[in-house]
Amino acid sequence: MSKTDNTTSNITFEDFKAEVLNDYKIAITSRECSLLGRREVLTGKAKFGIFGDGKEVPQLAMAKAFKNGDFRSGYYRDQTFMMAIGELTIQQFFAGLYGHTDIIEEPMSAGRQMGGHFATHSLQEDGTWKNLTKQKNSSSDISPTAGQMPRLLGLAQASKIYRNVEGINTEKFSVEGNEIAWGTIGNASTSEGLFFETINAAGVLQVPMVMSVWDDEYGISVHARHQTTKENISEILKGFQRDENSNGYEIFTINGWDYPNLVDVYQRASSVARKEHCPVLIHVKELTQPQGHSTSGSHERYKSKDRLAWEVEYDCVAKMREWMINNNIFTAEEAATIDKDIKKQVREGKKAAWNAFIKPLLNEQTEAVSIINQVAESSTNKTFIQKLATELASKDEPIRKEILVATRKTLRYVINEESDAKNNLINWINNYKATIQPKYSSHLYTEQNKTEDISEVAPEYSSDSDMVDARVILRDNFDAIFTKYPEALIFGEDAGHIGDVNQGLEGLQEKFGELRVSDTGIREATILGQGLGMAMRGLRPIAEIQYLDYILYALQIMSDDLATLHYRTQGKQKAPLIVRTRGHRLEGVWHSGSQMGGLIHLLRGIHILVPRNMTKAAGFYNTLLASDEPALVVECLNGYRLKEKMPNNLGEFKTPIGVVETIKEGSDITLVSYGSTLRIVEESAKELAQVGIDVEVIDIQSLLPFDINHDIVKSIQKTNRLLVIDEDVPGGASAFILQEILENQNAYRFLDSKPHTLTAKQHRPAYGTDGDYFSKPSAEDIFEKVYAIMNEANPKQYPELM
């Protein structure tokens, strides 16, 4: 099976015939993989299957228009396309179905995603960029419906930036901005808000995006009449069609079984998008789903007999075969011979994939059985242990869970025994886990150019350094960043013309241009998607979400896509996106958010940074731009007008990530907090000193990663007491912080008093100064909490306050 060629003009009939025959072979290969893949699931060799049968022919047409440097952002039906561009073989298809954990055998995700989730490799072994202009690229798929849409916008916008912004080193990323971002989606998923948000944003931005809707009239079992107004997505998007007076889309509709016209439409769409940077929508209708949605059920349950009969007649592969026979490309007999040969190739590819998958497991099984038997020979529980070995040895198709279950249970039978065999078993289990666990857990964060490895560079001051509004430090540091990094850009609501709502970008759009300092619409999910897609293509975007409360609009994409990208590709793709926002304390329910507990739990894979002032925030931006990892930076919403000293080394000083800072030393109790609350803690520390309580104050600065040097436990070893102050809800970030300190740092060993937390109330903060006072920790709350802890420890020295 060879990949499809880009269609060219002025070819001979024989060349044309060869190209069409190759396309047909790819379609049949893909179809046979789907059919045999379903059987592999139903016989138990694979866990779940979701396939691209019924969508083969339009994907061939799309592949013919897809060029080196282009990017795909699609979903789990696109196996034919991946085969057609030469990025998916039969053996790799089945390796994905089996969940092979070898990235060479299963290059899409090394078994971390179910089959049907496709990707290409953007990174070299050392984590540096490959030349993306020399290969066909696919961003890594995710399962959530329409989740691919926001990323698609950014992948397309990158071409606009590369075409129009001077000074960027484009060598590995773009050829004059000619690359297209190709999106695919099922018709039912166009009901998602992310689809409409992205479609609107792409029309506004005028980016080279070609969006294909594979329409088979169903979303699992639910018909289009329940999904889409008028049952027709292109019909209801007609208002997006561009005309001579306004920008918009080019919109095409085409039947999914019409091979020659599909090829023509995709060539026309490619030309428009590539040359004019105009987005295109292709509504591919009359597609089928011969095996239903997935291996979890049968479509005979919800489709009528008439519909099923129609699907047989209008199956796109059958119609392509019919067209080829009618146009003398092959005979029915020749077609049957091709089909038969490909069936054999698919069976052989499946067998090779299974053998490659099962071989290391059988070897591991053999090792485990041998070592269990060795333990049995010297144990008083020989009979029970031999039973475990026999049961494990009987597995014809062992899995790693079964291997570890048997060996770990063996260890229980020799708890009270000592032998060389037992020690060998312990070593084997530890070595096995050390070898195997990374196959499932590595690359949550980058393993090269880590942010934690970047050393601190302190802000430098002179004797005459000015005290300025803190927002001026941010503004001037961003100025230095955009001067130093031509590939850096920032965008968000009000970020451009007025320089953000707090003037941290004042005047920068005028200096650096509208493409690098940009306003956006009110659409947080696609702001995040812009940044994600552009970061995947080598730019250094800073996506601004105006308030922390509104990050919830973008949270799914941050959690499902950005946070998992490096992990789900086993380090083969990255998106070093910086998300800038502001929060903690200001006014009312929607502008005082500090939902850090939720973010900590949902955003593993992204650094979460909580600077207490704007100098610290600026230092974080400088550190992040020197590294390769995504991060969320939460600036203090009530800190922009406070005075800070202006550093001399703007753009160069760096706040260390994962490192706490002791901002006041003390001996009686350790107070741990972050963000806006630090100022209140510092105020309380002065008041507590007046009654003889000497507190140590530590600024966490970085929630993810957390205190990598374990400095907090060193403080507790001195003070023997701990209070965590957090303006999140009870059990929010404070619970995470306590676990890190008590469990991971083992600080419980040094505590003379119960560890305490002081948090906000369970509700959102109420409006006004009094609302803040009665909703979040106050200086009085902190004073009284600390005093009560000291009263319990020494009531004579600290008599009861109230």
Image: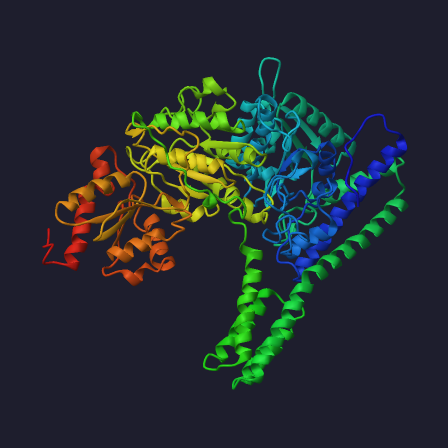
Q: Left of 13 or right of it: where is 574?
A: left
Q: How many marks?
A: 0
148 in relation to 742, above or below: above
Which of these two is toward me, 123 or 412? 123
Q: In which quadrant of the rendered view does residue 328 lie?
A: top right
Front residue of 423/211: it is 423
Kindly identify the residue that appears in the image at 72 percent across and 57 percent down.
353
Outermost residue toward the front? 463
Please give left or right for residue 9 compared with residue 506 in the image.
right
State the residue lying farthest toward the bottom: 380
User: Percent position (x, y) of residue 175?
Assistant: 66, 27
Residue 568 at what x, y percent from top left? 57, 48
Q: Is residue 228 visible?
A: no
Tell me where residue 81 sits by quadrant: top right
Residue 602, image x, y percentages = 44, 47
As drawn, is 773 to the left or to the right of 17?
Answer: left
Vertical position of residue 372 compared to residue 749: above or below: below
Measured as percent of width and height from the top left, residue 679 is found at 25, 38
Q: Residue at x 71, y 38 (%)?
A: 59
Q: Residue at x 45, y 38 (%)?
A: 623
Name above or below for residue 369 compared with residue 734: below
Q: Nearer the viewer, residue 100 or 539?
A: 539
One can see residue 227 in this view: yes
Q: For this rendering, which residue is in front, 592 or 123?
A: 123
